[in-house]
Amino acid sequence: MEWKDTGTTPPLELAARLGVSDLVAHLLFARGIRDETAMKNRLNPIAVEDWPWADVAGLDELLAVLAEAKEVGQGILVYGGQSAGDQVAMALCVGGLRRFGFAVSYCLQGLANSVDITAFGSQSDSKYLQLKLGLGAEATGVISLTDPSAQISVRISAEPDEIEGDHPLCLAGRAGLCWWLLRALAKGHNDGGKTREFSDLIALSSIVDGAAMLGLNRSLTQWGGAKLIYRPRTGLAALIRAAKLVPPFIASNKYIDSSLGARLRAAERRGLAATSIDLLLAEEAGQTDEWAVEIENGYREERLAQRQEEMVPETESLTIEAYIGLAQMRPVLGHEISRLGPFGRRNPEPLLASRRVRLVNVTSTGLSRRHTRLLVEDEEGHSLSGLWRHKEPEEVPGAWGDIAFNLRLDYYRGSENVQLEIVDFRLLVAEEDTELKPELPFSVEDKRTVSDRMGELAKLLERDARLQIWAEAGESPVSATARDKLQPGKVLVLWTAPPGPSILREALERVGPSKVVLLSAEKDTVVLGDFLRHLGGLVKWILANRDGIVGITELAGRLGEMNATVLAGLELLAFKGLLGYREEGKRLYFSREANSGAQAPERLGDLLAESAAYRRYFAQAPAVEILQLSTDAI
């Protein structure tokens, strides 16, 4: 795949004038925004409540028609198609009009990309009314004051790409049109709070319709996006429970569309559009759990039938907006980039790249096991976790190269971390006589393939009885040392493979050896059930012999796993009611009473798989590769 750079560089002082990082200033400049006022507006979009009113031809007439229908007791029928966008727009119109006292019902007519509001009347006299709301929105129909079968048809639809000018409704789509109508009704009723009640549906409408994330539409999506995920209405809350969705730390359009939007699209194809609308309109729990399960089952059936997650659009070229090193990527940078969102059509998520990295600790993940979790490492020893969707582990290159990625934030156990969602990898072609890997600061003896490990260890001890033997997880040769007890020394023997590169790096930093001896053997994969039994047994021993107190690092060393894996295991045991614990600093305090409100962790299986994958890599990769650290890092 061809990589293209924007080739733009902002003025050096621009970031300081805007009060942002150099990267964010670079991204704004790369997107063709040159005016500093426009840059500030992009960083701080206008709040929804502050958007100015603009003339919309026919809006007053439409409000008068609706008011007359309400006064004479006419019922209003909302009808439209079954697409995901229609489902949300219909729920938005029905729920909104009901909030303002209108008698409203709905039906599905199979119409595409439209929502019609129809009022039935039976008064005398006839007249025709044609209302042009303008900018892609039309209200057309006939009011008959004598013929009960006549009807008023108010059609809310939009073709925003055909709209020109600076009107606020430009690019807004149906969500913006619905909001405009509800805002006008709220103004007439002197109650803006009723409009805020529908901010989540307005955001969902924008996202599933694929509306442009600019102008008013961006403000509307930002306005309701957080409520949509973190304070969802009754029906959406039931769907999130049924789907066992775990919201990200920062809500994104991509997440909302791939989780909630995907289920609404499946509802269309499985004939469940009416159930979906009922779910979106529900105000009390009642039947919502049953409806949510029905929609979730339809989604799972659709996934099995279509395997949509395997459909990856092919791209001929990528436009890299900025290059950044792994050491520069911190959570604060992720928050700054999020100020440019929500991301979507015409406001894409920034595509970044890092040079001279490699991908290690590769393991499959996801329901289909067709995605890959890995670590991205640079030549200085910095590393970040990464996810490569639709890429199987055996397809991941093992050489050095450049990566293109989107930056993500992960929030786990009170800690924010940066993650990379990889888009592409470009092999690095080394110049002649150029060494890509820095020189090791110690010598290496690789004895991983010897048949008699204990015999080799005895020979090493004969030569130097002061060497340190690092062993974990019950593997205890003579004079073995745990990770938290390692001391500065000249020779370090690795008897067991570490669970991850960060643990290896910490051990090497503690010892600062002049020689490292690899004497580890490949270890069997740890089964989740065995891990929990071993962990539970250790906790019982600590309760009986240590007054329930132990250091996290010590406990992780006894199990041969990462600290995060041990904590995830404790969460699961607490969730099952088998123990209680609290974490203070670097120590754990256990009790026999289970923690109240403990939640089952979602990551334990993945964490164990990551450690197993790294150990496989450690057993097979060249010694110089697995021990590759710069002198500065030790």
Image: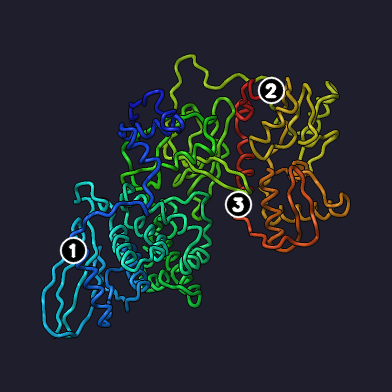
Amino acid carrying label 3: it is Arg
What percent of the width, then of the height, locates residue 357?
51, 29
Residue 271 seen in the current view: no
Amino acid carrying label 1: it is Gly
Residue 209 seen in the current view: yes
Label 2 to label 3: alpha-carbon separation: 35 Å
Nearer the N terminus, badge 2 or badge 3? 2
Query: Contact, CB < 8 Å: mark 1 with mark 3?
Result: no
Amino acid carrying label 2: it is Val
Query: Contact, CB < 8 Å: mark 2 with mark 1?
Result: no
Residue denoted by label 2: 444
Residue denoted by label 1: 58
Residue denoted by label 3: 603
Badge 2 marks a residue whose secondary structure is strand
* Mark 3 Cα shell of 10 Å, populated few (<14), some (14-19), many (≥20): some
Which residue is drawn at the image coordinates 63% and 59% (left, top)? 600
Nearer the N terminus, badge 1 or badge 3? 1
Q: Observer-nearest residue: 150 or 52?
A: 52
Query: Where residue 573 is drawn, which disc sits there?
Result: none
Query: Would you place residue 49 above or below residue 6 in this image?
Result: below
